[in-house]
Image (cartoon, rainbow, N blue to C red):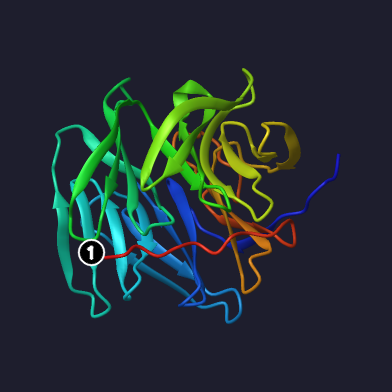
């Protein structure tokens, strides 16, 4: 099997680094520290980095079509305008619950996940939110809502509820996901599926929490590639760079008594594939 080399794009000590997202309009990568309540950006050309604090735990951040950001926060989904003005799009505080991963669908809607801090089964949700603030709960029996992505033609949606150890696939049409079924089950001892991304070949790349790796699976569910990393808590992955050929990987150090020196850093594996342009949130 091919051996892949990683580089440290941004050396950091994020408690729970997550959610890498390439913002094509800005030419930089967005990533977050959920428990550190921080939003980071990284420009691979200039090396410029920024960091800002949010007032509560942040599960995901995505670009908006008109500029600014949409934030999946502990108490709901908010909008950050280009002038840094913040407003709630959907505000729904639930004691003991926080936001987790989110993704923007081909139609520009946000599919936002939640979970309980204690990871209780059935305590989380996956919801579809549109730019006018309308919300529909798609799944209401989730434990740890995680990676979500779409096939190149937009006809399939992939989804991870981490404790199930599965990547599930749905048929997707008219903004609706139907026909949930397993695509892949991660074997015992290999970690738990976390964040994912889909490449231009329709293959699914998934980060393995407590598995120290990113794997690529074909649309038929066959294991195709493995990128081994020195940190056990690999959280998410996304393609970035001008040609979307570099795979950025977020990592965590939370809960580790003796974390590896790069745990909590943003890593990159160069020239490993070809990503898909990601839609911006239509709101």
Question: Which residue is denoted by mark 1 in the rendering?
Answer: 79
Does residue 36 appear in the picture of this structure? Answer: no
Residue 118 position in % (x across, y down): 30, 26
Look at the image and tell me in which quarter the C terminus lies. bottom left
**Quadrant of the rendered image containing residue 206:** top right
**Quadrant of the rendered image containing residue 214:** top right
Assess disc 1: are there few (<14), some (14-19) or many (≥20) residues with their C-alpha within 10 Å of its C-alpha: many
Q: Nearer the viewer, residue 217 or 231?
A: 217
Look at the image and tell me in which quarter the N terminus lies. top right
| Residue displayed at 51% across by 45% down | 155
Q: Is residue 236 left or right of residue 216?
A: left
Residue lying furthest top: 188
| Residue displayed at 29% across by 22% down | 122
Q: Nearer the viewer, residue 15 or 113?
A: 113
Q: Is residue 121 left or right of residue 171?
A: left
Residue 258 position in % (x across, y down): 55, 36
| Residue displayed at 18% across by 51% down | 134
Residue 165 position in % (x across, y down): 53, 24
């Amino acid at each position: 099997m091919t051996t892949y080399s990683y580089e440290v794009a941004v050396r950091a000590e994020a408690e729970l680094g997550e959610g890498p997202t390439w913002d094509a309009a800005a030419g930089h990568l967005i990533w977050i520290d959920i428990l550190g309540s921080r939003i980071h950006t990284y420009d691979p050309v200039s090396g410029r980095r920024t960091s800002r604090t949010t007032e509560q735990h942040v599960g995901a951040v995505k670009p908006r079509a008109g500029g600014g950001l949409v934030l999946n926060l502990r108490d709901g989904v908010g909008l950050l305008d280009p002038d840094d003005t913040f407003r709630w799009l959907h505000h729904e505080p639930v004691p003991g619950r926080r936001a987790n991963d989110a993704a923007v669908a081909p139609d520009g809607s946000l599919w936002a996940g939640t979970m309980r801090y204690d990871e209780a089964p059935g305590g989380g949700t996956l919801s579809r939110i549109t730019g006018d603030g309308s919300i529909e709960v798609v799944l209401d029996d989730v434990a740890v809502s995680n990676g979500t992505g779409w096939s190149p033609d937009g006809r399939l949606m992939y989804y991870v509820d981490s404790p199930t150890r599965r990547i599930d696939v749905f048929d997707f049409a008219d903004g609706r996901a139907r026909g949930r079924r397993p695509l892949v089950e991660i074997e015992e001892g290999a970690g738990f599926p976390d964040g994912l991304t889909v490449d231009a070949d329709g293959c699914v790349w998934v980060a393995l929490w407590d598995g120290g790796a990113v794997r690529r699976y074909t649309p038929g569910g066959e294991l195709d590639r493995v990128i081994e990393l020195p940190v056990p808590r690999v959280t998410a992955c996304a393609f970035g760079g001008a040609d979307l050929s570099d795979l950025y990987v977020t990592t965590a150090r939370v809960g580790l008594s003796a974390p590896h020196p790069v745990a909590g850093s943003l890593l990159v594996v160069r020239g490993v594939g070809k990503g898909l342009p990601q839609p911006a949130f239509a709101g």
